[in-house]
Amino acid sequence: MAQGRRARRVLAVGSVLALVAFVGGAAAAGDDPTHPLSEGAAKNAPASGVARSAALYPRDGRRDLTGDDRARYPGAGVLWCRRPDGVPQKAAAAWLIGTASTVMLNAHNFRNRQLETTRPVGDCYFQIGGRNYDFVAESLRLGVAADATRLHITDDWALLRLARPADAPRQPVPGAAPDLSTGDLALPVTLVAPGGHQNYRGDSSLEACTLRRIDPPTEGGIRRARHDCNDGYGGSGSGVFDGAGRLVAMQSASLSMNSRHAFDIEFHYGSALLIEGELLDALRQAQREDTTTQAPSQAPLQAP
């Protein structure tokens, strides 16, 4: 019982810290251990009292992205959104993937946990390779089911189409879902954060870290991966890559954001959704429908 109370208490605190959005609203605490709340998308609104320099864990191995990194992990872009006064602000990571017009990012950039609209697509744009691209607002596809009443980790994805094709390399759609067994594991990965983190000095970052557990599939046949990668506000949507440079997951949220606790598989960890199930199906569909901008010539990805 004491352990259960501790779990609820930590999850509630972590969820509050993880859901402060830069548009100004903070969500109420939740205690759902299966689906902890998603983090706010932008870097400029940390929870009160959180130091800007505090990493998620005491160990911080992040470094700035280099040109070689961007070549190894193509498609890395940034979602920018305008404040009510019209000033653009960096919001989250986003990925040009499959075609020159398809962008993958988190649904919580536009919806809160109760699926209420937090910002319209028209207030945002995609930046990659130093250029800005508007979205086709009506192209927004959310990962949540039509009858859903909540946003969870495993349906926290969205796809958008650009108003014009981006002149930039893109991330290929995985050739297969990650060949990862459900349960505990220790898979070395790299977290690529093109949008950076509020608690990191640079505009973008990369870190070698580890996937520690794959939870059973839930929404859309997608599984959550728990990891020990450092995260911070603005890190949503970051890509999780295996040792061969293959995209296996997309960052969604972290518990107890910025609290610098040691990694704990039950109470203090990052959450990413694997690129599988309905998300992988949607990416493949977007690629089939975009007959004018096929993905660049690359060897098809296989399961890691």
Image: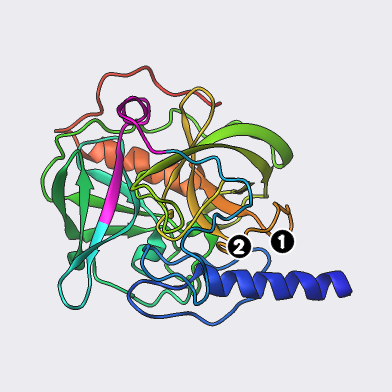
Kind of residue at badge 1: Phe
Circle 2: residue type: Leu
Measured as percent of width and height from the top left, residue 206 is found at 45, 38
Mark 1 — residue? Answer: 267
Q: Residue at x 82, y 71 (%)?
A: 4
**Residue 96 found in image quarter:** top left
Estimate the spatial distance between the alpha carbons at disc 2 and disc 1, rounded to whole Å: 7 Å
- Residue 282 vertical placement versus 39 (above, below): above
Q: Secondary structure at mark 1?
A: loop
Q: Which residue is mark 2?
A: 255
Q: What residue do we see at 34% from left, 24% from top?
A: 68
State the image coordinates of residue 25 (x, y, percent, origin top left). Answer: 40, 80
Residue 210 on the magenta segment: no
Question: To which quarter of the image does residue 185 belong?
Answer: top right
**Where, quadrant-wise, is the N terminus in this rendering?**
bottom right
Magenta stretch holds residue 65: yes
Q: Which span is picked out in magenta?
A: 64-79
Identify the colour scheme used: rainbow
User: Against 25, is 134 above or below?
Assistant: above
**How many marks on residues?**
2
Nearer to us in this view, 64 or 100: 64
| Contact check, label 2 and label 1, Cβ < 8 Å | yes
Tell me the crowding category of disc 1: few under 14, some 14 to 19, or many 20 or more residues within 10 angstroms, Cα based. Answer: some
Which percent across, then down, holds residue 65?
37, 36
On screen, residue 297 above or below 43: above
Q: Nearer the viewer, residue 260 or 217?
A: 260
- Which of pointers 2 and 1 lies earlier in the amino acid sequence? 2
The image position of residue 249, as x and y in percent, is 50, 42
Quick one: label 2, few (<14), some, or many (20+) residues within 10 Å? many
Q: Quadrant of residue 187?
A: top right
